[in-house]
Amino acid sequence: MIEVDCAAGTIVGFTDGVDARFLGIPFAEAPVGARRFAAPEPRPVFDEPFAASTFGATPQRGRPYPVTTIPEPSIPGDDTLTLNVFAPADGVGSGTAPVLVWIHGGGYVAGSAVGPWYDGAALTRDGIVMVTLSYRLGVDGFAAVDGRANRGMADWLLALAWVRDNIAAFGGDPGRVTVAGQSAGGGAVLALLASPAAQPLFDRAVAISPVDFSTPLDEAALVTIALAGSLGVAPTAEGLASVDPDALQQAVITWGERHPGSEPLLFEPVSGDELLPLPIRAGLAVTGLDKPLLIGATADEFDSPGFAGSSTEPEAETNETTDVAAPRQTDVLFRASVLRTARARASAAAGTWLYSFDWASPVLRGAAHCIDLPFFFDILGAEGVEAVLGDEPPAALAARMHREFVGFIAGAEPSWPAAHGVESDPVLVFGVVSSDSTALVAGAYDAVLPLVDADLGE
């Protein structure tokens, strides 16, 4: 066991002498009853030592999707607003190590912070304190209810405030905090960069396969009305709370199946309130410009032939009216977001550095969504990795990618030039020449410039 005394109280974790782990620490009161659709309430100081030996309950319930690339376990229970701290055992109490705060993906409606791919061992080995956090998902986290939204975003901010106030006791420096995430978690990073309220809570940012979409508050209210109407309840906290949480999650996950041809239900950061006054794209041009950003996407994301739900067909998809190849989901959703973010931050005092992950999985037959994470975390032996990367993923590429990202988290400036969202921007490409190499490529994102120039809107 290993014990720390911090502002939150006494917390007891466990250690093997190299890593120290503190799991399932509640940073907020359980979001149930009257608190379910309210802003998160900070957890009072523990009266007794808190045993941080097991992961806490997850906002994700059951298995919303039968197949996911990342193993994403769910743990039942009400106390879902928790975080996990992984730290070098010999540095506990020092308050000097750089800190990585990780926000998981899942389209803002699913995902879990307790998966084996988010293990912090490789980062603690390199002297970094890692924090993974849970936040409210779907309706509970982002639906516009009774005129308010962004409860999931408020959860991120409260967790970051907890890190600020407590992380020194675990060895982390509260003045050296990097927020990072992938997919919706990458979108969360962009939302935090665009949020004035979040600015004092972190210093650097890493956005992996992010989306830069947000929904205006009035449009979010219409989404809530549509969902509530389909369930036969009022679009209010009281009405939605009357629906079993499992049934509510399934109603969101299966909306497209049950309402073919209808507009999709989008639960995501909502613009127009105190947390996100401007849409993410507009906010990125005026807020967070003093924070260095490392951002990129995989080459194929949702369009790898072996990826579940891939849009790739044997022949290129075309627009029936123009007979012109339609843009890939990969480009519309992710790679355009990367370049658009670089363009929005062109005047940033801190730089924006682009990367692209191009190594093709022999299983998924492309550089698919999520497959870069085992390389980023350097966990090629983790559960579920072989199933998507094959039995010989290139360890040298994992070592190189991990080293680049660790250097950034530790405060180093990347070794390649910053980008500005224009033609021929420099991009560090992982795995472009061979399975264990990187290359600096000018204009690796140029193919999505027409999408960025067209400004597809929110």
Image (cartoon, rainbow, N blue to C red):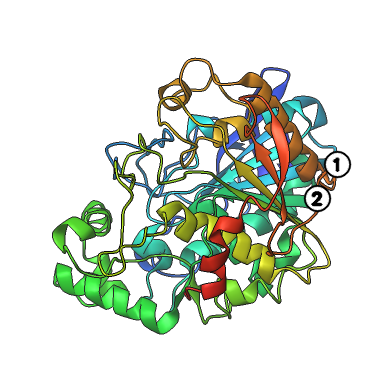
User: Which quarter of the figure has residue 281?
Assistant: bottom right
Which is nearer the eye, 243 or 334? 334
How far from the left and from the top, in percent, is residue 158? 60, 60
Which is nearer the eye, 38 or 67? 67
User: Which quarter of the figure has residue 148?
Assistant: bottom left
Of all residues, the one furthest to the front in this rendering is 323
- In the picture shown, does residue 438 fall above or below 262? above
How far from the left and from the top, in percent, is residue 164? 73, 55
Residue density around tag 2, few if under 14, some if 14–19, many if 20 or more, within 10 Å = some
User: Image point 50% across, 31% down: which residue?
Assistant: 360
Q: Which residue is mark 2?
A: 176
Secondary structure of the residue carrying numbered label 1: loop
User: Image point 31% across, 58% down: which residue?
Assistant: 318
Which is nearer the eye, 2 or 151? 151
Q: Which residue is mark 1?
A: 96
Of badges 1 and 2, nearer the viewer stands 2
Secondary structure of the residue carrying numbered label 2: strand
Left or right of residue 222: residue 50: right
Any part of residue 130 in sight: yes
Q: Are marks 1 and 2 in contact (CB under 8 Å)?
A: no
Quarter containing the N terminus: top right
Any part of residue 147 in sight: no
How far from the left and from the top, in percent, is residue 260? 16, 62
